[in-house]
């Protein structure tokens, strides 16, 4: 398939004398913008990606690409303009530089808006961000991983079919360079496999997801992911709505991770400063149960968002957010830090979706301090309640501004200290503060979940959650 | 092959080079190959705290090639539209299966589907005029009430031009201009924060954003936020639900539409598989996927495989009549091409996707539906939803809801999610009003977002689970 040397894009780049490494591209673009009257920051991404999907023992789709692009942030007099392009030719980059500067004319001035200065500290060097396996494994090898995951799910009891089994990976180089003197570059690799299995019995179908992730395909256990998908689908066969009422709910790690990601959006200083957060004005106050400790760890080993620097070249670091229920910090980028004043510094959370977007404020890796025991132990301690295995409608049913949560869930009743009847077609409703305050126990089963952000979460038990199901 | 300032609509992808790329892709064998080329220019402006925070513009330019053999697809893309780059990509994707195909039909022009009208090209409107409208929306929303604390206004415009050449021998092109504005308003009283959000969007030009329309949009969002300050927690349990016209159509989108997409049908992972010709709802229920509706957000001239868009009847008098296909699934299932092969951009493989879906109008008025409901929930506005096509279970969030008591809309309620099962809820639709409206949204699937319209007249579902906190 495609290799770096055969890339037609690579040939063109060499022919026109455009340099190759992300930082070299960023410096070159910055240099071409010197004549423009604005402070400039160039963010460059170059990568290689592979995605394989299988269905019924065959490769359904294989795609290979080498995406690249660049974004330019222009700042003058507190106004900011941004432009991006996937066209890294001289003409494409020149047009993008000019557009970014033209765009700042449309913006209103803000005294706190300026490009970050270079950090006085050295960039951290997190170990193992790039591993050779993603580049080294053949496409056929990657196809085998997806096929193995599918086969493992199909070999499990009650599994009718596998809706999809996917292997995907990415090697990415990113760089930031600015007229303020910021220069940073990093390389990373990442791969993930996931499987959706369908269990069936008579007319009924239930689905379950299993996954594995790492920085090298050699770290993945596709068979375990396949079995996990199968087990989760099978556990729901025969599910019915449970009775409406107030329950102690045990959130599976994946759902705990998704909820934590949603809640932390409201810990963005940008949300707080603009009145979009229920945590505004609450630093130093108790916002959750004393059992709850939560960190943003931009350097965590095993975290998929780990990087030496954020989307504006500020070093990533560890920021305690909630300690034993007390709110300690918000997340900052350089703009929100300047606006907060009193010597506030960026926490290295100037995150970008890609080169197509300005750096906003976002979490890196979130880490919830675990409790003790496996899921079964936590369920035994809870005694009676509802175990939530999966949730639907998280993007629409969680309002990060008002803090309201109302989502559909599937799972199992917790009866007599064990997992009992499967449950579906019920909703749970709560809000951020009640959820954090209601945490009554945590498992010791923390796992990295790369599905909704990057979160290391254990199973979490929360009391007094409203469950709407069948007639009470 | 370069994308030029076009002399005519096909200048972007000249026939002969397109034919050469498709031919090169199939040289190693395969049933079919396709070249997709895209040029997209976009601009967005964002206002918050009364200031235009930033203006962002971007250009996407690239091409992708796919080779299909049986149900297996090999795909790749380059951030370039030069013939040399695309031929290199085609060569990389071409793998021998020992069944060499000698001849590929020459690529001929296909009559384009009908394009949407653009009366005022947004590129011809000064950015200061656009910025002025964002400020107008902000000031209007703040003027509604002193309890309005924050207003976010987002403006977006894009022009996407696509060219598709396939080994079936045809070359199609489309030119899509879209304009949108959304207003999100936060209101606060005694620590309670509530939000209201409204969007105005269409496939067309800047003519969408007349001052009066912007004022109405901002007022609507602000009124919702302020009204919801008076809300009480939503009830929990099963009850009749009246879904208001417009974005309520996300009900059809989630409860039924996704399950009619032919990729789920092919994999037998849809609850609707094998059910065409069967009664799935009352005789008064009609539903459509309308890819050609005038100015609708999800309308196009042709889909992203070059198939002209059309209007497909999905449910007729309560009977399921059609699935939504792309070329690959249509071929394997023996289905007609419905023009639903869509993709987010040239970096993506197309899938069967909805365009604009809606229930057809009924004989009642919205007021009659309310009067006829002794107790229930009136969902005036929905925030979006999600479905599991395999089980048919769906949820969607109510962003503005009210109790119905004694045939009257009474107190506002917050934090409600509706949950149900697709086949069950369609049968539960017992009355439909005459006030059809279609609104704009973004549909996510396989990691790709595409613009869709969702709509309906006001309708009532006999019984649905409402997930609130008030037990």
Image (cartoon, coloured by chain):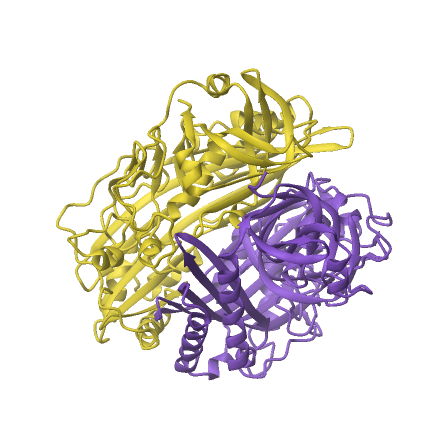
Chain colours: A yellow, B purple
Residue A124: quadrant of the picture: top left
Residue A93: quadrant of the picture: bottom left
Q: Can residue B337 be seen?
A: no
Percent x, y of residue A279: 34, 47
Residue at left 51%, top 34%?
A465
Please indicate whether residue A81 sits to the left or right of residue B397 in the image: left
Residue at left 56%, top 30%?
A149
Indicate the quadrant containing the C terminus of chain B: top left, top right, bottom left or bottom right. Answer: top right
Percent x, y of residue A179: 19, 64
**Is B259 in front, or is B242?**
B242
Residue at left 70%, top 45%?
B239
**How many numbered discs, if any?**
0
Say above or below: A164 vs A82. Answer: above
Q: Can residue A327 be seen?
A: yes
Percent x, y of residue A296: 31, 40
Percent x, y of residue B159: 52, 72
């Amino acid at each position: 398939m495609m290799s770096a040397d055969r890339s037609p894009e690579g040939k063109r780049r060499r022919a026109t004398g455009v340099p190759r490494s992300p930082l070299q591209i960023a410096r070159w673009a910055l240099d071409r913008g010197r004549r423009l009257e604005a402070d400039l920051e160039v963010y460059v991404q170059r990568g290689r990606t592979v995605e394989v999907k299988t269905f019924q023992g065959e490769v359904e789709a294989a795609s290979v690409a080498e995406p690249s692009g660049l974004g330019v942030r222009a700042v003058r007099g507190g106004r900011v303009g941004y432009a991006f392009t996937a066209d890294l030719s001289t003409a494409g980059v020149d047009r993008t530089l000019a557009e970014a500067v033209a765009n700042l004319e449309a913006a209103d001035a803000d005294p706190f808006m300026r490009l970050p200065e270079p950090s006085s500290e050295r960039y951290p060097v997190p170990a193992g961000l790039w591993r050779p396996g993603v580049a080294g494994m053949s496409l056929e090898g990657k196809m085998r991983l997806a096929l193995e995951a599918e086969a493992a799910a199909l070999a499990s009891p009650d599994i009718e079919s596998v809706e999809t089994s996917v292997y995907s990976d990415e090697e990415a180089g990113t760089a930031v360079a600015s007229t303020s003197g910021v220069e940073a570059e990093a390389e990373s690799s990442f791969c993930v496999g996931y499987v959706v299995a369908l269990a069936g019995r008579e007319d009924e179908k239930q689905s379950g997801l299993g996954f594995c992730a790492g920085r090298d395909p050699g770290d993945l256990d596709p068979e375990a992911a396949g079995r996990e998908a199968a087990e989760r689908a099978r556990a729901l066969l025969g599910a019915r709505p449970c009775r409406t009422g107030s329950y102690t709910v045990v959130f599976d790690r994946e759902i705990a991770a998704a909820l934590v990601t949603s809640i932390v959006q409201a810990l963005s200083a940008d949300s707080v400063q603009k009145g979009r957060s229920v945590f505004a004005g609450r630093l130093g106050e108790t916002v959750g149960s004393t059992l709850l400790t939560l960190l943003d760890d931009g350097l965590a080993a095993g975290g998929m968002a780990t990087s030496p620097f954020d989307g504006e070249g500020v070093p990533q670091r560890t920021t305690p957010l909630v300690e034993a229920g007390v709110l300690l910090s918000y997340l900052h980028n350089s703009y929100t830090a300047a606006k907060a004043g009193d010597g506030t510094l960026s926490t290295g959370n100037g995150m970008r979706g890609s080169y197509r977007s300005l750096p906003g404020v976002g979490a890196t890796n979130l880490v919830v301090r675990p409790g003790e025991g496996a899921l079964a132990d936590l369920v035994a301690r809870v005694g009676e309640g509802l175990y939530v295995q999966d949730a639907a409608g998280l993007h629409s049913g969680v309002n990060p501004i008002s803090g309201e949560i109302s989502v559909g869930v599937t799972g199992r009743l917790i009866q007599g200290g064990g997992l009992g009847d499967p449950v579906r077609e019920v909703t749970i409703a709560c809000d951020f503060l009640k959820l954090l305050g209601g945490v009554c126990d945590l498992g010791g089963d923390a796992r990295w979940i790369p599905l909704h952000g990057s979160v290391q979460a254990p199973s979490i038990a929360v009391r007094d959650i409203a469950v709407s199901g069948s007639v009470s | 092959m370069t994308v030029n300032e076009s002399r005519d609509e096909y200048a972007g992808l000249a026939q002969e080079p397109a034919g050469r790329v498709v031919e090169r892709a199939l040289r190693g064998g395969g049933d079919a190959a396709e070249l997709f080329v895209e040029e997209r220019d976009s601009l967005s402006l964002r206002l918050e705290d009364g200031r235009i925070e930033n203006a962002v513009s971007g250009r996407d330019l690239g091409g992708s090639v796919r080779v299909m053999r049986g149900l297996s697809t090999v795909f790749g893309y380059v951030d370039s539209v030069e013939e040399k780059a695309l031929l290199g990509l085609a060569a990389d994707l071409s793998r021998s299966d020992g069944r060499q195909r000698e001849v590929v039909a020459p690529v001929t022009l296909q009559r384009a589907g009908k394009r949407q009208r653009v009366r005022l090209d947004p590129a011809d409107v000064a950015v200061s005029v656009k910025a002025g409208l964002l400020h107008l929306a902000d000031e209007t929303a703040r003027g509604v009430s002193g309890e309005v604390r924050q207003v976010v206004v987002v403006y977006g415009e894009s022009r996407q031009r696509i060219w598709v050449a396939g080994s079936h021998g045809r070359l199609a092109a489309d030119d899509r201009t879209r304009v949108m504005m959304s207003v999100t308003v936060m209101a606060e009283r005694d620590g309670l924060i509530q939000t209201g959000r409204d969007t105005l969007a269409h496939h067309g030009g800047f003519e969408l954003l007349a001052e009066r329309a912007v004022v109405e949009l901002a007022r609507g969002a602000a009124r919702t936020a302020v009204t919801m300050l008076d809300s009480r927690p939503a009830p929990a349990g099963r009850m009749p639900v009246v879904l208001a016209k417009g974005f309520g159509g996300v009900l059809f989108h989630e409860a039924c539409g996704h399950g009619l997409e032919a990729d789920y049908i092919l994999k037998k992972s849809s609850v609707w598989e094998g059910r065409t010709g069967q009664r799935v709802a009352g005789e008064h229920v009609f539903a459509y996927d309308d890819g050609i509706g005038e100015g609708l957000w999800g309308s196009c001239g042709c889909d992203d495989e070059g198939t002209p868009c059309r209007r497909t009847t999905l449910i007729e008098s309560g009977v399921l009549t059609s699935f939504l296909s792309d070329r690959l699934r249509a071929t394997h299932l023996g289905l007609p091409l419905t023009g639903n092969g869509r993709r987010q951009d040239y970096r993506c493989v197309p899938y069967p996707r909805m365009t604009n879906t809606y229930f057809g109008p009924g004989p009642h008025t919205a007021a009659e539906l309310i009067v006829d409901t002794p107790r229930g929930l009136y969902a005036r506005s929905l925030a979006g939803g999600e479905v599991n096509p395999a089980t048919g279970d769906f949820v969607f969030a109510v962003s503005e809801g009210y109790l119905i008591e004694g045939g009257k809309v009474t107190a506002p309620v917050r934090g409600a999610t509706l949950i149900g099962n697709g086949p069950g809820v369609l049968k539960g639709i017992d009355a439909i009003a005459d006030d059809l409206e279609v609104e704009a949204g973004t549909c996510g699937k396989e990691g790709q977002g595409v613009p869709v319209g969702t709509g309906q007249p006001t309708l009532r579902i006999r019984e649905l689970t409402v997930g609130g906190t008030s037990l």
